[in-house]
Amino acid sequence: MDINLNDYDFIDFGASKGGSIEFAKAALGGRKGLGIDLDPKKVSTMKSLGIDAIQGDFTNLDLPKKSVKFVIMSHVLEHLLDLETVEKTLESAINLSTEFVFIQGPVFDSDKYLKSFGLKFYWSDWHGHTCHLTTYQLAEILSQWNVFYNIYVREKVVDSNNSALIPINSLSDQFRYDPKIHQAKTFANFPKPLYKEFVCIIKLNPNMANWDSIVKAKKEMHLLINNINV
């Protein structure tokens, strides 16, 4: 892969149309990012928007280790083939970064619980979401390496009225609840709040100066798994 990383301080895995690159610059302290995507069409789209991007396989990147401050992955892991691919992708991101890795994605932890209410999160039945990675599976993968990490959840769901919940028998690849196309939902309160999105921050430099601002990059973060003791 013929690319000079000296001009970049972060990499965006699965950059798509470049939205997460802008988020990384605005909220994570990034200066200039390089987008990497498996889809050549998305790479072309990014380039047409003036974003530096290359096509690449996250698990097999011919890039020097510790070459950027951080890697961001926004709603990427759920599109990978399986847990083995997730593990290799995470390892690649950790190897490339000196400061931290920032990951966010949809929560799949509540799928079985919601089924008992005849409900599902709409993203849990998308053909594009081939890996329903839970936060605890993510923690298990990260725990095999000598890295510090925190996993947070955000966007609380307290009852079945939330539009992200649709009837369990709805067709695949649906979006938010719409009474015009979905069956009526039976109302239910959830004794323990559910959440829509997880955020995982892997802290690679114990002395990084901007840790507090990284943790505050997303609103309404609730700490779920704490593996940082520094």
Image (cartoon, rainbow, N blue to C red):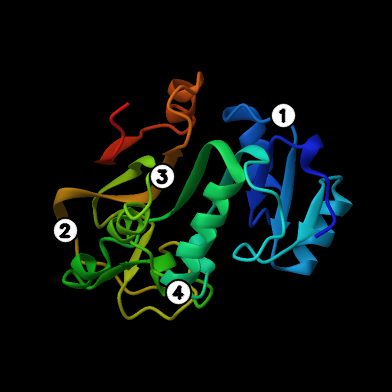
User: Going 72% across and 29% down the picture, which residue do you hit?
Assistant: 31
Judging depth in this view, the residue of 122 and 78 nearest the camera is 78
Q: Is residue 172 above or below residue 180?
A: below
Callout 4 secondary element: loop
Write down the residue under mark 1.
31
Relative placement, left or right, of 154 versus 3 is left
The Cα atoms of the two marked residues, 1 and 3, are separated by: 21 Å
Write down the residue under mark 4.
82
Q: Amino acid at mark 2?
A: Ala
- Return the x and y of residue 4 as percentages of the image width and height: 83, 45
Mark 2 residue crowding within 10 angstroms, few (<14) / some (14–19) / many (20+): few
Comes first in the chain, label 1 or label 4: 1
Foreground mark, 1 or 2, reads: 1
Q: Quadrant of the C terminus?
A: top left
Relative placement, left or right, of 174 versus 153 is right
The Cα atoms of the two marked residues, 3 and 2, are separated by: 29 Å
Callout 2 secondary element: loop
Residue 40 in sight here: yes
Q: Residue furthest left?
A: 191
**What label sits on residue 188 in the rendered view?**
2
Comes first in the chain, label 4 or label 3: 4
Write down the residue under mark 3.
200
The Cα atoms of the two marked residues, 2 and 4, are separated by: 33 Å
- Return the x and y of residue 204 as percentages of the image width and height: 47, 36
Judging depth in this view, the residue of 229 and 107 nearest the camera is 229
Judging depth in this view, the residue of 29 and 166 nearest the camera is 29
